[in-house]
Image: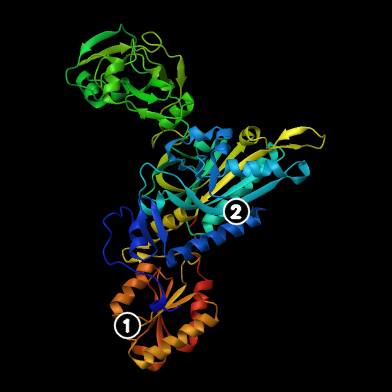
Amino acid sequence: MRLTSYFAPTLREVPAEAEVVSHQLLLRAGFIRKVAAGIYTLLPLGQRVCQKISAIVRQEMNRAGGQEILMPILQPAEFWHRSGRWEVYGPELFRLKDRHGRDFCLGPTHEEMVTILVAAEVRSYKQLPLLLYQIQNKYRDERRPRFGLLRGREFIMKDLYSFDRDWSGLEENYWKMYEAYTRVFTRAGLDFRAVEADTGAIGGSISHEFMALAEAGEAVVVYCPAARCGYAANVEKAETVLSAEEIGTEKPMELVSTPGVSSVEEVAAFLGLPSRQVIKTMIYRTEKGLVAALVRGDREINEVKLQNYLGVLELELASAEEVEQATGAPPGFAGPVGLSLPLVVDREVLLVKAGVVGANRPDAHWVNVLPGRDFPVERLTDIRQVSPGDPCPRCGQPLQSVRGIEVGQIFQLGDKYSKLLNAYFLDEKGEKQPIVMGCYGIGITRTLAAVVEQHHDEEGIIWPFSLAPFEAVVLPVHTEEPEQREVAEEVYRQLQERGVEVLLDDREERAGVKFKDADLVGYPVRVTVGKHAREGKVEIRWRRTGETWLAGKEEVGVKVSALLEGANFVPSNR
């Protein structure tokens, strides 16, 4: 391919809208272009990388026994009503009507459709297990689409679904997919970690997320550094360890004036007490009404845990007006004593024997509050968020944290969808049994962005060999000089004959522009045809390390092939 006829428009300036490195570089290097918020066109370079990621995914899914299908993006609402997810998925679901007024949605995922497909075709245990997958565009109306391909409203995803006779079959396929995902992300050159995760709107019992470690990641992962432990979890899922330490000494409850003092830090400083002795009361709005959640003042509420405990579809902090109407006081002075709202109490709060809480009146707090004596603790559970330094729930070592980009997630669904959608089979005894399911997703476009987040420098992208849009670029410094032009053409043909994916930069541009574009796009190998062309020599440069070699033009094919074959940029998976 010649660059004069290849559609790869590069940008010199960083687009103002681009916040993270991957977004900036993919726009500047001509891989993507924005259509609307969270919606992007893949240009030829971006499409080539996506095709390479998809090829790796296909190879590993097929190796694990998967069979590729392609289901419609447009899904009848009836399927989602049957599963109960038409309401559960909420505003992220793109909904539309056809000309007859019938409801449809654009598929964010395909559990309903694939289950109904299998329910209509599978009758006997002899047809199981079955693993079906597709690679397809998905649609989610994100509230805040941002970071380019990392959080979009239209994206490419691989989703595989396993169908088994029993739970042991599901277990086998689940861990088979776990290993397949490990191979996919290793081959893609990602530094990643598999962590325990919440199942969210997909549902099911057990789930793992595959997190590409990056500062731009929206997720926080906590993990145990102990080599023999291996515990890791998304903070939304991470378990807490209950301390045995009691805080304060029981005394009669007393009302104190706290004028203008509302935050935990202010209240603690005003009273001369540690923040952990304050009991924080947060008021949330749900579709079932308002609810109050209580944690220690030095802790944060894990809203995913709280939402799962309450079994609600919507959970948002109440407005200042709602808080004042429910408590009689502005935010910062809400407390559980005498509050006529459901109270969800973090189990750690029970260890506070002389707590400080808002008095549900302006500028006042109760002190020496004893949970169970002064307010009910009927709804007691773990709703606090784990923090770095907390003890590991497996071995007790202090946990560490890192940010990550979710590039894949796997779920054990069990019989949730099969029972709702009537997917049964007859076992060896002729008895009717529900099919046991799992589902497994990989974000193709998100993986592309995650790779760029991990593989770049100040000059541009540094593609792992396995994903590079082109493996090499041949760059004549002065195309108007016959010797350089002829040597460049000869080297270009030589690399093509050896099966190297090569691009010839035959543009009549300044050498500096060509060099900058080559580094920006991130071709693994650059072959520069310059002043040594008259001697029949060219310069070979390895993008990742910056190493250069001078080689005879007849040697280029052998040397570049050897470089590419020996390339091994797979990081050790921590």
State the SS at label 2.
loop
Toward the viewer: 285 or 533?
285
Q: Is residue 571 above or below residue 139?
A: below
Q: Nearer the viewer, mark 1 or mark 2?
A: 2
Residue lying at the far right in this picture: please name it.
429
Image coords of residue 383 (percent x, y) = 43, 26
Residue lying at the far top in this picture: please name it.
252
* Mark 1 to mark 2 CA distance (whole Å): 44 Å
Q: Is residue 190 above or below residue 521?
A: above
Image coords of residue 7 (percent x, y) = 40, 71
Circle 1 residues within 10 Å: few <14, some 14–19, many ≥20: few
Residue at image x 48%, y 28%? 308
Tag 2 or tag 1, which sits nearer the N-term?
2
Q: How many marks?
A: 2
Image coords of residue 175 (percent x, y) = 62, 45
Q: Is residue 533 above or below residue 57?
A: below
What numbered label is drawn on residue 508?
Answer: 1
Circle 2 residues within 10 Å: few <14, some 14–19, many ≥20: few
Name the residue tied to disc 2: 70
What numbered label is drawn on residue 215?
Answer: none
State the SS at label 1.
loop
